[in-house]
Image (spheres, rainbow, N blue to C red):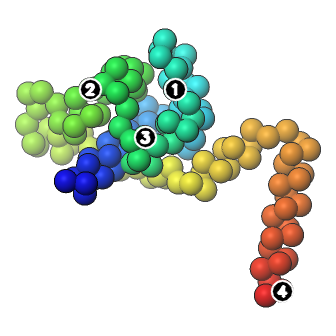
Amino acid sequence: MHGGMQLERAEFSKRLREALVKAGYFAIGPSDVARHFNVRSARKVTGSAVRKWLFGEAIPSQTNISTLAQWLSCGAEWLRFGESAGEDDAAAGQRQIRVPHPITEETEMMHELASLDADAKQMVAGLVKVLLEARTTR
């Protein structure tokens, strides 16, 4: 049963990423998704919660799924379950899209780094340099 829930979360994550791409958000991180979501909802979410949605660790509440579906112009039923009322299998297959650039942990990290101020970016660059030097001297 545990594996079924894990698969369900992974499938939801895939559909959410597909809906984001279809809506024109090709490389958007969890914090940006949360910002866009929070503009549209009285129930605020955090970047951490969205990250769980995007990486298949959690499925949002039905209320939040409805908000996502309205924002991303897709069916709430499809977003949650992968199917739409009254839609046959052929239509469902035609509607599926490929995600050209899936959101990865590295993409999320790049978005977070981009949001830092210049001094913080310089500190991160210095840290990366030290880590790379330490790796090559091992």
Q: Earlier in the sequence, mark 2 or mark 3?
A: 3
Q: Nearer the viewer, residue 136 or 19?
A: 136
Q: Residue type at mark 2? A: Gly
Label 2: element kind: loop
How far apart are the two marked residues, 3 and 1, measured between alpha carbons?
11 Å
Label 1, secondary structure: give it.
loop
**Which marked residue is nearer to the observer: mark 1 or mark 2?**
1
Crowdedness of circle 1 by 10 Å Cα count: few (<14), some, many (20+)?
some
As measured in the structure, the alpha-carbon distance from the residue carrying label 3 to the one carrying label 4 is: 39 Å
Residue type beneath disc 3? Trp
Which badge, 1 or 2, comes first in the chain's sequence? 1
**Mark closest to the chain's N terminus, 4 or 1:** 1
Secondary structure under badge 3?
A: helix
Give amino acid for label 1.
Answer: Val
C-alpha separation, residue under disc 4 versus residue under disc 1:
43 Å
Left or right for 86, reference 123: left
**Where does label 1 land, which residue?**
45
Which residue in the rendered view is the most extreme toward the bottom? 138
Task: Name the residue carrying label 3.
Answer: 53
Q: Provide residue 10's location: percent of width, then percent of height.
A: 33, 50
Given contact means CB atoms under 8 Å apart, are the residues at marks 4 and 2 in contact?
Answer: no
**Mark 2 and mark 3: Cα distance apart in space:** 17 Å
Mark 1 and mark 3 in contact (Cβ < 8 Å)? Answer: no
Residue 78: image location, x then y, percent:
23, 33
